[in-house]
Amino acid sequence: MYRQIFVLMCLSSQAGYASYTSYIGMNCGAGISGKIGNYELFKDDSGQIVSLKGKNLKALFMNAFWGVEYGNFGCELEMNASLPSDYKDHIIVDNNRGQSIFQFTQKSNLIGSAFANIFLKVSLVESLHAYLSGGIGSSYYNVGDMNVGDKTSSYISHRGSPLVNKAFAWNIGCSIKYNLSEHISINLISYKYYALGTFNTMKNTEDGSILSANMNMHQVSTGLVFEY
């Protein structure tokens, strides 16, 4: 479906231009997620709900892309891979046994995504250009194991099970590109916001309860572009 959308965008962009430039490229960088992990974990001995607050996760980022440019417009296919850091936190709970410290660990696996993008090119000075872009696509995320354990003992309150998640995703961003030569350019800096959808993990394998979180990433990267 996304390939068909991409072809339609390219055909519509081609109108009015006699020539075009094809390119491939790769970016590498880092990012940070929006706050995730507003989880209600369990009830303590007094009946109060023990919850985690949201937390931002750092991530490594890499993407590869192929596209065509017609004058000041263009379209591209983009493939991404992000690796967030593991989510780790602790909770202090007062109960009948005294004070307990629970350690929460959520393993983060690779997030994959693919997009069909369109963009607008704005020439700043000779060989220096700005790009505004946006696109739609899908994301894939295999949420890792989740453990909630008492740090003062070997007791494990919950051991979650990994779930494979697929979701609708979209992005919007901007970048600055400098032409080093006729065929080689460098992305001096690129910023993109990725809304990667809602991901679920199983909180308790006994009752099948699910924890959900919206995953979004702010990514900053740099890279090379080869035109042909």
Image: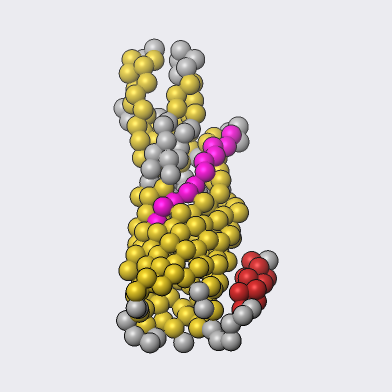
Q: Please state the horizontal and vertical placement of residue 55, each as a whole percent of the image.
A: 39, 39
Q: Nearer the viewer, residue 140 or 35?
A: 35
Q: Quadrant of residue 116?
A: bottom right
Q: Quadrant of residue 82?
A: bottom left
In the depicted structure, whether residue 208 falls above or below residue 225: above
User: Where's the N terminus, which quadrant?
Assistant: bottom right
Q: Which range of residues does the magenta coloring cover?
A: 209-219
Q: Residue at x 40, y 77 (%)?
A: 225
Q: Is residue 112 left or right of residue 11?
A: left
Viewer can see residue 222: no
In the depicted structure, whether residue 17 falls above or below residue 42: below
Q: Is residue 125 left or right of residue 18?
A: left
Q: Residue at x 37, y 21 (%)?
A: 93
Q: Residue at x 53, y 52 (%)?
A: 196
Q: Main secondary structure of the magenta part?
A: strand
Q: Please state the horizontal and vertical placement of residue 13, each as a whole percent of the image.
A: 61, 74
Q: Is residue 19 magenta?
A: no
Q: Please state the horizontal and vertical placement of residue 26, each as a whole percent of the image.
A: 41, 72
Q: Nearer the viewer, residue 104 or 125?
A: 125
